[in-house]
Amino acid sequence: MDHTVTLSRLFVGIQDDLDQVDALFQERSTSGLDILNSASMHVLGAQGKRLRTALTLLSGKLHTYRFEKLLPLSVAFEMVHLATLIHDDIVDEAKTRRGLPTVNTLWGDKIALLLGDYFFAKTAGLIADVRDHRIDQLFSDTVATVCEGSILEMMTAGRIDLTPDTYYEKIRHKTACLIAACSKGGAIASNASDEEIGLLYEYGINLGTTFQIIDDILDYTKDQSTIGKPAGNDLRQGMVTLPLIYALQEHPQNGHYEQVHDLLISTTRKEDDIQAVVAWVNSGYGIQRALTDAHTYSYKAKEALYHFPPSPDRAVLDKLVDFVIARNR
Amino acid sequence: MDHTVTLSRLFVGIQDDLDQVDALFQERSTSGLDILNSASMHVLGAQGKRLRTALTLLSGKLHTYRFEKLLPLSVAFEMVHLATLIHDDIVDEAKTRRGLPTVNTLWGDKIALLLGDYFFAKTAGLIADVRDHRIDQLFSDTVATVCEGSILEMMTAGRIDLTPDTYYEKIRHKTACLIAACSKGGAIASNASDEEIGLLYEYGINLGTTFQIIDDILDYTKDQSTIGKPAGNDLRQGMVTLPLIYALQEHPQNGHYEQVHDLLISTTRKEDDIQAVVAWVNSGYGIQRALTDAHTYSYKAKEALYHFPPSPDRAVLDKLVDFVIARNR
């Protein structure tokens, strides 16, 4: 596997369609109010790798590719993702995202709240343009589940006794569910059979789970220059993730357990204490065990693709799993 | 006109259908998460007069009444209204609404933000159940406009030079637009002609404008016991509304102008200063001029109904205008 492969090389076959998705996104996020436009332009500039769009389009390519339906669907997925990120940054009191100041940092929590709402509102019109009742239902269920995931994350913050099961429930709700909706939605909008729709859902939910585990590992292993936020960011917010859960399981009752406990219940977490726990997690098997889990989920994602006949598009979906796993290097 | 008429007497003909709307609302707002359910139950208990549902159903009654479409549509309108109220209470830092503590007071801003999002998500599925592309578009446009209205309100807060025109632009976006969407949506879902859809939009936008002017008058004339919040609440938040705009026009450059100016730019508004301005606005013609405007809009709302043949349902829509105006007593 070539670790230097970039997403843009992987997506070269759908580049023109990705550009059209970008154009429609810009068109639909324009408002009559200047401040909304300024905030929109800011978040559009900071936009990520269009993973959700690519997933939607590529899943569609495995069946009867109907770009006129996949176009508004992709924009809706990207837009609702952006809305949840903007609202998450308020909840997390995040100052930066991908190296840029967040909307709440630049314009305050209130504008950030309303910009997120505005994007939510706009998605309704986009989903309507797909004109498929199953898509309407998928979209509504997915966004509700993501909201439940955010609440679950809030409710479990600071809990040193978080189990892997609850961790997985949380990331399935908060992250994997929307990624699975992209691959499932792409299949629905392309007249796939019920079995194929189910398989692409399986692909997405396992890819999304892999993605989030790797994200949580990176939060312990990489510094700001690589992922646009300081190492130990989750811990700084009192969030207990898989590497820490496994590290704690390894040393259930010793000095480190007390150290993590004190850090989590503290209202003013000191940077030195955070970095000490980050170093401790890096020194044990917590990272490795989390990575093993990520590999298990990545195999499941690939397995779901086996049913489909080999094709360049199936190969890209397969390589996408490798890409997500390779992010940990 | 009988001032003692209550909304429940006015809506007696649609009571069974209103109850079904309540039941579906409860069903659709149920989540797998306890805290979401607690917060939902709290806001459902504090629910208002179901004005939006009644408007949707009654507008449908003027044409081919199709309750199976009006039912999810009404629930969606009530739910999105509730979502915007929950988010507004965060933005306004409101402690109470209708005499009960707000969600942000009881559970904090973060849960309130996510509960609002959850309701937004749920509306998408309800709107899908109407299965009418025009309704999808109406709904998306309306929610986006309401968000713009909230931002406009934030941007114009503290502005002593606010003109009646900007005030009207703000309340059309923030309040009247959603009320107009109810009457227009009821017409669309009931196979009304384009002309009739336009007339019911006119009815709604003018009724909604009347409603908000009266609300803003009540904020100066009534104390907490009547409307569930203290008099001068808008002023307390630095919001300049029609009674104050007209009072300031009456006395453009005297001691009171300075007094209001100082109050608006102050970061810590003292209750005595607020009540002094409230008393001053009540002593002049500002309230009366705002009330005259409200009457003008109420006539326009009634005028839009003239096109429809007389019927008990048309009469209820007509009396609803009287009810909204009579709230100022």
Image (cartoon, coloured by chain):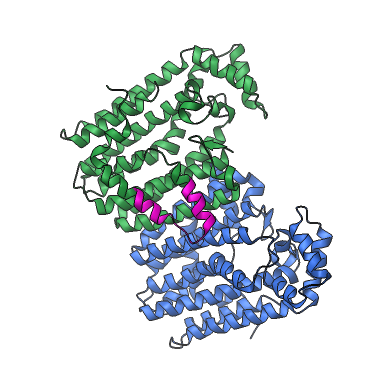
Chain colours: A blue, B green
Numbered marks: total? 0
Q: Residue at x 35, y 41 (%)?
A: B52
Screen quadrant of the N terminus of chain A: bottom right
Answer whether residue B220 is magenta in the image.
no
Answer whether residue B25 is magenta in the image.
yes
Q: Residue at x 65, y 70 (%)?
A: A215
Depth check: A78 or B276 in front?
B276
Image location (x, y in percent) of residue B269: 65, 26
Q: Is residue A178 above or below residue B67?
A: below
Q: Is residue A54 above or below residue B308?
A: below
Q: Residue at x 75, y 72 (%)?
A: A221
Q: Is residue B148 visible?
A: yes
Q: Is residue A71 above or below residue A190?
A: above
Image location (x, y in percent) of residue A289: 69, 80
Image location (x, y in percent) of residue B84: 48, 44
Bounds of the magenta span?
Answer: B22-42
Locate residue B90: give its quadrant. top right
Q: Image check: A3 left or right of B76?
A: right
Q: Is residue A110 above or below residue A51?
A: above
Screen quadrant of the C terminus of chain A: bottom right
Depth check: A301 or B282 in front?
B282
Q: Image check: A157 left or right of B98?
A: right
Image location (x, y in percent) of residue B127: 35, 54
Q: Is residue A5 visible?
A: no
Q: Residue furthest front?
A: A253
The chief SS type of the magenta part is: helix
Depth check: A144 or B50 in front?
B50
